[in-house]
Image: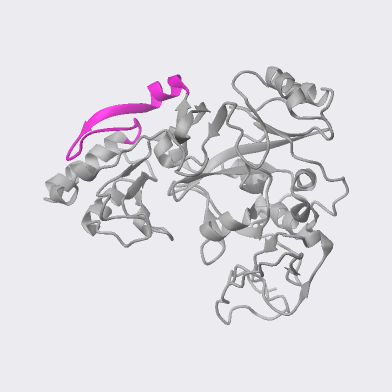
Amino acid sequence: MPPCTFRSMWIAGPRVRATAAAATAAVLLLVGCGGSDGTDTDAGPVEPTRPPRVSTPPAVSESPDDDTYVLDPAMAVDEPGPLQDRLLPADLLVFGQGVLGANTVDRIKALDGVVAVEEMGLAQVTIENRAINVAAVSPASYRRFTPAASAQLQEVWDRVAGGELAIDPGLGRKLADQDGLVKMGVSADAATIHVGAFADQIPQVDAVVNEKRGDQLGMDVGNAVLISTGITSPQSVRRAIARIAGGKASVQILGPDLDTSVQQTVFLTGGSVAGVVGTFNYTILRAGRIAPDESWVASHISTEPVPILGSMTCNRAMIPQLQAALSEIVDRGLADEIDPAEYAGCYYPRFIAGSTTLSNHSFGLAFDINVPGNQRGTVGEMDRTVVSIFERWGFAWGGDWGYTDPMHFEMNRIVEPR
């Protein structure tokens, strides 16, 4: 078999089947270990082909003839085999600051009205200034909680078992690069994972990996449980579950929108920079603002003097290298390239406008400068020498993103000034 190459985000060609199970379904990414007709795919990149927007169940492309999806054998788990269990609704999600433990899970299972419980890992990774929720799951048992089209498409779970990522289609198209890869976090040392499938996910989960991948990403596998209550109202058992899970756990009813009535949990992972955030709870305020635990704010957020801008309120871990970068900009005669009047802040504990998604500003790890001339989707006017200085001091620049944000810089590695 030829070595794997990644040429196209969609499986294209005449070999297509339509099935009832495929209704709105997961669309597989092509893994070029030979084309779907057995031909070599190294002839060149194939332009992405999007499925038609139709009201009837769309056709779903078949997988490659080679049904082996293992890209990194060390990250593979046992193949899940055909779906055996009946599908269940995903009604409640418990998300703790640490592993919930067998006793807690057993007590939740024993509650009247609880039909099934699925243990998993849950964490956030920040990609292009948005925190996405990633679950580390057992492909064989977790699939029954997912939307029917995703649950019934065998290739999705074969690919997850093989070490690949299954991700919400809309998000995956934005984040995957031309080779179908997603860097799982802002950190320079964050793991990169190949997208094996675009697949609809349960509410409040954007993407899934297997448990070995979860370990690789630094997730606490077992810090979350998914609960199905069947015909029982999830509201009727939430209070009892919350008592068992403890005051530091988030217990939310799953629906199309985030359950803003309960506290939420952040477990940031995805490389070394995530370690300066750690885990904390927050409550949701009005107008998209959030209130992190006061103890987390006291230990992680600080206001300090910096060159050019006067003072900044940011994550404590970021401030030394930020001061060093701004000092070098002054020393090199470039201070006039940053306008203090056009600084738009660093630590903003709120959702991204119009969403319930956190950004790196919520963790104090990002800042925006020279705002008027550096709007999203533009090349911007940022001095490139200033950009290179920030990059040398451990900051990634939003101007390098697929959908640019040239006013934005965020910490992507830890640099200790000497």
Q: Which of 87 and 261 is in front in this view?
A: 261
Q: Is residue 149 above or below residue 348?
A: below
Residue 393 shown left or right of residue 120 in the figure: left
Q: In this view, does 291 lie above or below 51?
A: above
Q: Dividing the picture into quarters, in which one does residue 323 lie? A: top left
Q: Which of 210 and 350 is in front in this view?
A: 350
Residue 358 in the magenta stretch? The answer is no
Residue 218 seen anywhere in this rendered image of the structure: no
If the image is split into quadrants, where does the C terminus sit?
top left
How far from the left and from the top, in percent, is residue 1? Answer: 70, 73
Residue 59 shown left or right of residue 401 in the figure: right
Residue 295 shown left or right of residue 23 in the figure: left
How far from the left and from the top, in percent, is residue 114? Answer: 81, 28
Residue 305 seen anywhere in this rendered image of the structure: yes
Q: Which of 247 and 103 is in front in this view?
A: 247
Q: Is residue 363 above or below residue 398?
A: above
How far from the left and from the top, in percent, is residue 333? Answer: 11, 50
How far from the left and from the top, in percent, is residue 172? Answer: 58, 57
Q: What stretch is highlighted in magenta?
A: 293-318
Residue 295 in the magenta stretch? The answer is yes
Q: Nearer the viewer, residue 32 or 371?
A: 371
Residue drawn 77% across the image and 43% down it: 145
Q: Dividing the picture into quarters, in which one does residue 251 lie? A: top right
Q: Report the number of numbered marks.
A: 0
Residue drawn 75% across the image and 69% down it: 59
- Check the image and tell me how it is coloured: one colour
